[in-house]
Amino acid sequence: MDAYMTNINRLIKDHKMLFLITNRNMIKRPTLSHVIEEAIDGGVNAIVLREKDLSYDELIIIAKDIKDKIQHKDVLFIINRNLKVAKEINLDGYHMGFHDLVKEKPKWHKLLGVSVHSLEEAIIAEEKGASYLLASHVYETDCKKGLKGRGIDFIKEIRENVNIPVIALGGINHENVEEVMSTGVEGVAVMSYIMTDEHPFMAAKRIKDNM
């Protein structure tokens, strides 16, 4: 493992990481980059750019803008499911779905995140080279209406059976984040809790202060 990956893995392992997954259609601030900058100032440690409806040409413009604005901040910048953009502008990480990983591991030498929804998927993802796992969903959430949360025991079981960082996702807020962190996970990820807030700085800070 090169020094770059060693440092990134240490960053995730040694911190109570707060990941922000983007959705520009939810924001109440002028621009997505505005929300991201405020959220980072409030305590966000990693940005996952997840704008699935955009073309490569549209996405790379947004990605470059965000990278320019956060390049001097101590934060990871990861992109969801667009390896071309990740490589083009040299991002910290690339995030993908479990089934995509099973089909073919990407040619990518930096941080590789994988979404998992079961212990079996978590174990396989680690075996296939994932750097960290995004495990969901813990609680019921508006992002997946009608689907019951898998609960704290689901997250705890994964944490106890893999050796890579686990980031919990799904319905997490400032009131339940302490319970989630008690399972031993390295961090949590949120989308709507910060994206829909008129004050992203305060939303991020509320969660971070309770981790």
Image: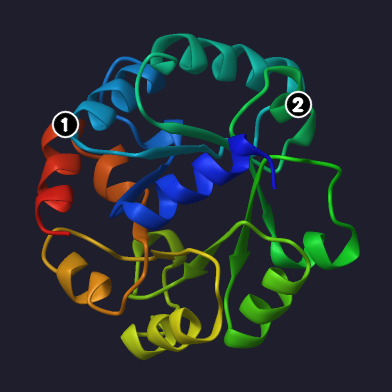
Residue 113 picture location, percent across and down: 61, 53
Q: Residue at x 71, y 66 (%)?
A: 98
Residue 174 vs residue 60: left or right? Answer: left
Q: What amino acid does circle 2 point to?
A: Lys
Q: What amino acid does circle 1 point to?
A: Phe
> Which of these two is toward me, 73 or 136?
73
Q: Residue at x 57, y 45 (%)?
A: 6
Image mark for residue 46: none
Q: In what element is the residue under mark 2?
A: helix
Tell me if residue 19 comes above or below residue 38 in the rendering: below
Q: Which residue is mark 2?
A: 87
User: Mark 1 vs mark 2: which is more N-terminal?
Assistant: 2
Q: Which residue is mark 1?
A: 201
Q: Residue at x 30, y 15 (%)?
A: 30
Residue 103 picture location, percent across and down: 89, 64
Bin the neighbour count of mark 1 within 10 Å (Cα to Cα): few under 14, some 14-19, many 20 and up. Answer: many
